[in-house]
Image: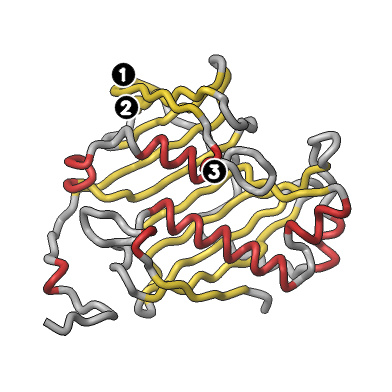
Amino acid sequence: MDKYRHHYNVILDNMSLEEYRLRPISAIMYLQDAFARYCATKKMAAYDLFPKNLYWIVSEFNIEFTDKSPFWSEEITTEIWISEITKLKIYTDFKLYNRGKVFAYGNACWFILDQTTKRPSKTDIITEKFNIIPEFVIGEHKKFSIGEIKEKISEIVHKNNLSDLDFNNHVNNKSYINIAETAMTSEFKKTYQLKTLNIRFNKESFLDDILVCATHKTEQPDTYAHIISKDNISICEIQTAWIKNTKTEDIFDYDLAVKSEI
């Protein structure tokens, strides 16, 4: 077996202020960090590829939540593995655990790009380093596509700033999710919890670019399409599906990992 595991704790910066729970965007960032650590064990991290004029890029991310996310201070275990490699694509599947139970799972599609041409490189160097475990947690890897778009419910304009950038000087994918998340009001997020998130990155954007995020209802109930564009060209497409909260918990009644002394 060649699955990689790493442990994290929910810290203040990664929780929602409404519920003290791990934000979905933070779950995705933990998974990306775990994959980077996994690559580092194989000498395939970003800093290993840079001298070879190559860099990693994620093109798609799909995650499903089976239960409410962990509370502040609780431990999360990430488990990630390479499940499929084609001529140009690398697929990872993953699971997230809390208190011994899976609370989220999904997959991601990655490329290794040539820094000069910006085109995908062949995956031969990956197959030489990693074992493939053909275990698909959602099912066969298929290209994600947004369903039929209905009425627009909001539009947000965002100017990229330094905090949006990653080490490649591109806008970090968490910034796109942050932009889309602002379309959902605090009142909505108190009533609903995120069930699934699918995101596809179509193009890069950079410092000072002006992005427009249009959020639409779709043909599926409680499912929304967030189209982020630059100069009327789609940069990123996100689909979120939500379910109504069936139970409310008081943070002070929860069995936290860190106890109050009061």
Colouring chosen for the image of the structure: secondary structure
What residue type is disc 2 on?
Lys
Q: Which residue is mark 3?
A: 173
- Residue 226 drawn at (x, y percent): 42, 30
Helix or strand or loop: what does disc 1 sit on? strand
- Residue 104 drawn at (x, y percent): 41, 62
**Callout in the foreground (3, 1):** 3
Residue 262 visible to an observer of this rendering: yes
Earlier residue among tags 2 and 1: 1
- Contact between marks 2 and 1 (CB within 8 A): the answer is yes
**83 left or right of 182 in image:** right
Q: Which mark is residue 217?
A: 2
User: CA–CA distance between discs 2 and 1?
Assistant: 6 Å
Where on the picture, by quarter, is residue 216?
A: top left
**258 left or right of 88 in image:** left
Where on the picture, by quarter, is residue 169?
A: top right
Q: Which residue is mark 1?
A: 151
User: CA–CA distance between discs 3 and 1?
Assistant: 25 Å
Q: Residue at x 76, y 68 (%)?
A: 130
